[in-house]
Image: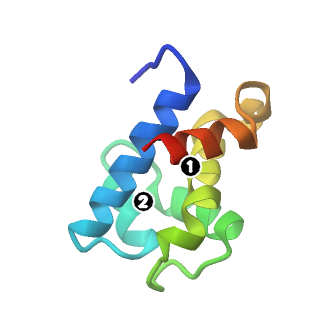
Amino acid sequence: MQFIDPVYGFIAMTRILRNYQRRGLVTLRDMISTYAPKNENDTNAYINFVVKLVNVAPDAPLDLGLHLFPLLKAISEFENGSRFADFYNDSTIQEGIALD
């Protein structure tokens, strides 16, 4: 999906992740496996990438209050690759979280 401003993408991603948690998806593995299913992605590579940046074990319960920002950043970086920093900065991500 494409948004007219990156902040709207971070608002949407914040809502998606919070909805996952409300549905009982509480680990990085749960969330990434749902967000990036194996029929569309290399889900294990995605999980491993996110785990390193968020610094939480893949099967440990995730506290979105503490880990939402690094999780959004890691997902965005995985999706955009090395050009991530060309498009997004921390304040854009923080604004998306705040506006949810």
The amino acid marked with disc number 1 is Ile
Q: Quadrant of residue 5?
A: top right
Quadrant of the frame with the N terminus = top left
Q: Residue furthest bottom?
A: 60
21 sits left or right of 72 in the view? left
Camera-side residue: 82 or 96?
96
Residue 94 percent location from the top left of the image: 63, 46
- Compute the Cα span from label 1 to label 2: 9 Å
Residue 84: image location, x then y, percent: 72, 34
Q: Residues within 10 Å of mark 1 (few under 14, many from 20)?
A: many
Label 1 sits on a secondary structure element that is helix
Q: Can you identify the residue that label 2 sits on?
A: 32
Residue indicated by mark 1: 75
Report the residue at 54% width, 61% height from top. 68
Please state which of residues 45 and 13 is positioned toward the viewer in this rendering. Answer: 13
The structure residue drawn at horizontal position 61% and vertical position 69%, both measured from the top left corner, is 51
Q: Amino acid at mark 2?
A: Ile
Q: Is residue 60 above or below residue 89?
A: below
Can residue 36 be seen here? no
Answer left or right for 67 relative to 62. right
Residue 35 position within the rendered picture, expressed as x and y whole percent measured from the top left: 36, 51
Circle 2 sits in a helix, a strand or a loop, which is it?
helix
Q: Is residue 2 visible?
A: yes
Q: Who's the residue at 31% across and 68% down the image?
A: 21
> Residue farthest to the left?
23
Quadrant where the C terminus is found in the figure: top left
| Residue count near mark 2 (Cα–Cα under 10 Å), binned few <14, some 14–19, many ≥20 | many
| Residue at left offset 42%, top offset 71% | 29
Of mark 1 and mark 2, the one earlier in the sequence is: 2
| Badge 1 vs badge 2, beta-carbon distance below 8 Å | yes
